[in-house]
Amino acid sequence: MFWDYTYILVLIGAAICAVASWNVSSTYKKYSGFSNGRGMTAQDAAEYILRSAGIYDVRIERIGGELTDHYSPGEKVLRLSDSVYGGTSVAAIGVAAHECGHAIQHQVGYAPLKLRSLSVPIANIGSKLSWPVILVGLIFGMTGLAKAGVVLFAFVVFFQLITLPVELDASRRAMKVLDQGGLLAGDELKGARKVLTAAALTYVAALFSSILQLLRLYLLANGNRRRR
């Protein structure tokens, strides 16, 4: 038995993701207790934002779960989770506005969003095949195969890399429309910004964790070559 020092990279990545996850959950919970002064629901806010952006062909649907909110470009559907859809809290409005930001990106042809959509199939292949390929390569001492698995995992990292600017831009658009549209103001606007910032940090953490994992896989593949 021996200690694989590369596990340190995994532990660091897991710790960073755990902290980011706790931060977004606690921040969302905190501002879920603050209702907006206009008594507007997140669904109402989403409809207003879409219409003000000239978007009339996107449906707004309710979806189960917590923080499962997302925009589907292919279907042109904006889905809001149970706690967001009919919620009047600053947190709910912020999340809904963020997803509207993605719909606006889609409408204006935001390049990073297009690139992310095109990268989904490749990222899925990398996610499913990278580990099996790497393990087979390591077990049987096939360095080339192990390295191929590392390249496959790099596709996953690339997808997360291009996801980050997409998410940050959606939040930027959300805050802009919330401010200029007068949907939120003062402390309400500050609260929404904190919620979206906490959410953005989860993407930063995921990217950093994946980069550490990629480094670990690279070290393992090259370590296998040196042991031959």
Image (tube, rainbow, N blue to C red):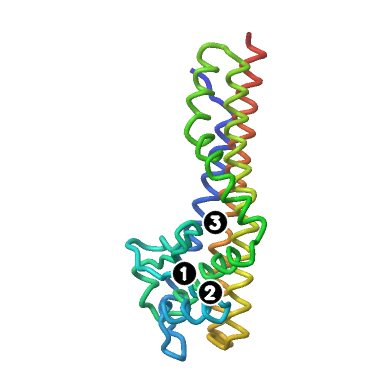
Q: Mark 3 points at which residue?
A: 202
Give the x, y percent position of residue 81.
37, 66
- For discs 3 and 1, the disc positioned in front in the rendered view: 1
User: Pointer 1 and pointer 2: residues touching (CB < 8 Å)?
Assistant: yes
Element at label 3: helix
- Of the two numbered discs 3 and 1 on the same chain, state the one appearing first in sequence: 1
Please tell me which residue is depicted at 51% across the width and 59% down the height of the picture.
73
- For discs 2 and 3, the disc positioned in front in the rendered view: 2
- Of the two numbered discs 2 and 3 on the same chain, state the one appearing first in sequence: 2
Q: In this view, does 43 lie to the left or right of 194?
A: left
Q: Residue 55 carries which label?
A: 2
Q: In this view, does 79 lie above or below 45?
A: above
The amino acid on which the numbered mark 3 sits, given as a three-letter code, is Thr
Q: Name the residue under label 1.
A: 58
The amino acid on which the numbered mark 2 sits, given as a three-letter code, is Ile
Please tell me which residue is depicted at 35% across the width and 68% down the height of the picture.
62
Element at label 2: loop
Considering every residue shown, the one lying at the far top of the view is: 228
Please tell me which residue is depicted at 38% across the width and 73% down the height of the picture.
85
